[in-house]
């Protein structure tokens, strides 16, 4: 059946089923050559795979509760009239608990989609919290090229670099902790491009924006370059596309399991935070918004050998996410316990606020997705493929997505069809290596029409455009 020619939004992705045999080689996916209008429904509705037998490393396998319990010299089993009565009592208790405490189980997610409430006399970036959730103080720090620290103050009203004179490790740690990174990694000097800077004052405050003031004098024009985490480094420098990844190839790759099954990908950006896609948490299915239903796996390349999982504390879906157009398709996960870094577990770097990955830039996308359009199973192994950034005007042309790619999105792949990301990769990373030889998170796998189809490349959430939201939510949920 042909798709609706007047459709306005992307198409649903196909289902993921349990791998019943070894996955095929990750070859270039060649889609249909027919020309049709862009799809009409959300690209992907999460469909968790059926349970498969896996090996959990570094921990014992969970023990199932026995159906019979020893009672003296006999066994008391869940059966007969007594067992039925007991089950009915337990069911009644479960229903009562669900009614009375069910909403609180979702408080870590649904409440985060509500917009902040602020007074009419709000003052932004003055170091004092006016709004209920503190959003007036959460978009006051950003990073430019070369990690240049820029701070907005209520007096200046715009972002300015911070003079290196008077800067110290304590200020660096405070600034990074304010953003949700716990501590700083390194500080260096970078030449200012502006004659106006911010200088450190002796004021005591919990925010960096309240500890600096505007100045026209900065010795040698040296300003602060701040790195909050050691990021974007691979253990392996020789990556081969089209084959299963090795440990350390993509150490920021995350596998998100919903109720025990891989459902979406994600990216580790800080010890306590993972970035993924909003469409992995459909609002019409409330169970997807319960943090306890999700487990996060890091430092692994096979769904058959899983390490100890991390538990989700908060699911923070972008308030402006539109499930019809997939605009603002991004979600931040706060973990209950910090991730310890190793050679196989590393965060990816977040790009500068104004970073533009030019068309033609060769990047990589990775995940546990299906290896061909319409496949009945996903890959148990982590796979990766190279994709090129595509000019937005080309991707939005009448022969492609006809204007449906917003400013918060970009396309990557091949307009002729071929290399692409597929379903299980939803929410996973698209990363690009910059001139400093570090890897940066350019995109979050969002939507597309089938997989590897001509004039239908993959569409990704543009991280640089969504950075203010990411930093804002990290600051609100910081440990």
Image (spheres, rainbow, N blue to C red):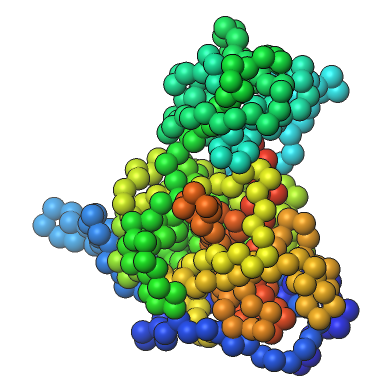
In this rendering, is residue 96 above or below 17?
A: above
Residue at 75%, 50% (x, y): give it.
320
In this rendering, is residue 296 above or below 215?
A: below
Q: Which residue lies furthest to the top in this view?
A: 202
Q: Which residue lies furthest to the right in this view?
A: 6
Left or right side of 476 for 65: left
Q: Quadrant of residue 130?
A: top right
Residue at 79%, 86% (x, y): give it.
36
Q: Quadrant of residue 388?
A: bottom right
* Residue 475 in sight from this viewpoint: no
In this rendering, is residue 226 above or below 49?
A: above
* In-front residue for pair 207/282: 207
Left or right side of 346 for 193: right
Expressed as whole percent of the image width and height from the top left, the position of residue 279 reads 64, 61
Residue at 59%, 16% (x, y): give it.
219
* In-front residue for pair 376/145: 145
Q: In which quarter of the image is residue 302?
A: bottom left
Residue at 72%, 21% (x, y): give it.
196
Expressed as whole percent of the image width and height from the top left, the position of residue 16 reads 52, 77
* Residue 452 in sight from this viewpoint: yes
Expressed as whole percent of the image width and height from the top left, the position of residue 80 reads 33, 67
Count the marks: 0
Q: Which residue lies furthest to the left in this view?
A: 73
* In-front residue for pair 277/27: 27
Which corner quadrant holds the N terminus?
bottom right
Expressed as whole percent of the image width and height from the top left, the position of residue 218 reads 63, 17
In this rendering, is residue 202 above or below 311?
A: above
């Amino acid at each position: 059946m042909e798709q609706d020619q007047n459709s306005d939004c992307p198409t649903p992705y196909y289902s993921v089923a349990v791998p019943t045999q070894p996955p095929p080689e990750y070859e270039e996916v060649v889609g249909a050559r027919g020309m049709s209008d862009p799809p009409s429904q959300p690209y992907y509705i999460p469909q968790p795979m059926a349970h498969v037998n896996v090996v959990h490393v570094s921990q014992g396998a969970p023990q199932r509760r026995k159906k019979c319990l020893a009672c003296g010299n006999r066994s008391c089993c869940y059966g007969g009239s007594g067992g039925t009565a007991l089950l009915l009592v337990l069911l009644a208790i479960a229903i009562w608990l669900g009614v009375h405490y069910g909403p609180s189980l979702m408080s870590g997610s649904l409440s985060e989609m509500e917009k902040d409430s602020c007074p009419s006399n709000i003052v932004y970036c003055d170091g004092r919290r006016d709004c209920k959730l503190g959003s007036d103080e959460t978009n006051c720090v950003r990073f430019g090229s070369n990690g240049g620290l820029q701070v907005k103050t209520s007096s200046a009203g715009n972002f300015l670099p911070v003079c290196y004179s008077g800067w110290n490790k304590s200020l660096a740690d405070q600034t990074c902790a304010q953003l949700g990174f716990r501590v700083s990694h390194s500080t260096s000097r970078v030449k200012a491009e502006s004659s106006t800077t911010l200088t450190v004052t002796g004021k005591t405050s919990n925010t960096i924006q309240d500890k600096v003031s505007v100045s026209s004098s900065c010795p040698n024009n040296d300003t602060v370059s701040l790195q909050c985490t050691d990021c974007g480094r691979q253990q392996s420098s020789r990556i081969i596309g089209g084959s299963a990844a090795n440990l350390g190839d993509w150490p920021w790759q995350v596998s998100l399991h919903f109720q025990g099954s891989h459902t979406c990908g994600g990216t580790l950006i800080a010890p306590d935070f993972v970035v993924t896609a909003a469409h992995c948490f459909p609002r019409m299915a409330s169970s997807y918004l319960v943090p306890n239903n999700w487990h996060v796996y890091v430092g692994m390349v096979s769904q058959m050998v899983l390490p100890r999982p991390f538990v989700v504390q908060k699911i923070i879906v972008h308030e402006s996410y539109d499930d019809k157009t997939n605009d603002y398709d991004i979600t931040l996960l706060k973990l209950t316990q910090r991730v310890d870094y190793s050679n196989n577990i590393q965060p990816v770097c977040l790009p500068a606020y104004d970073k533009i990955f030019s068309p033609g830039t060769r990047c990589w996308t990775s995940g546990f997705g299906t290896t061909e359009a319409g496949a009945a199973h996903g890959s148990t192994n982590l796979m990766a493929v190279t994709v090129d950034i595509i000019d937005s005007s080309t991707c939005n042309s009448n022969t492609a997505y006809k204007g449906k790619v917003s400013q918060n999105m970009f396309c990557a792949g091949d307009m002729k069809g071929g290399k692409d990301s597929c379903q299980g990769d939803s929410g996973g990373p698209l990363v690009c290596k910059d001139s400093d030889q570090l890897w940066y998170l350019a995109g979050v796998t969002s939507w597309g029409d089938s997989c590897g189809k001509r004039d239908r490349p993959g569409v990704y959430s543009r991280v640089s455009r969504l950075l203010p939201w990411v930093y804002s939510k990290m600051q609100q949920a910081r440990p």
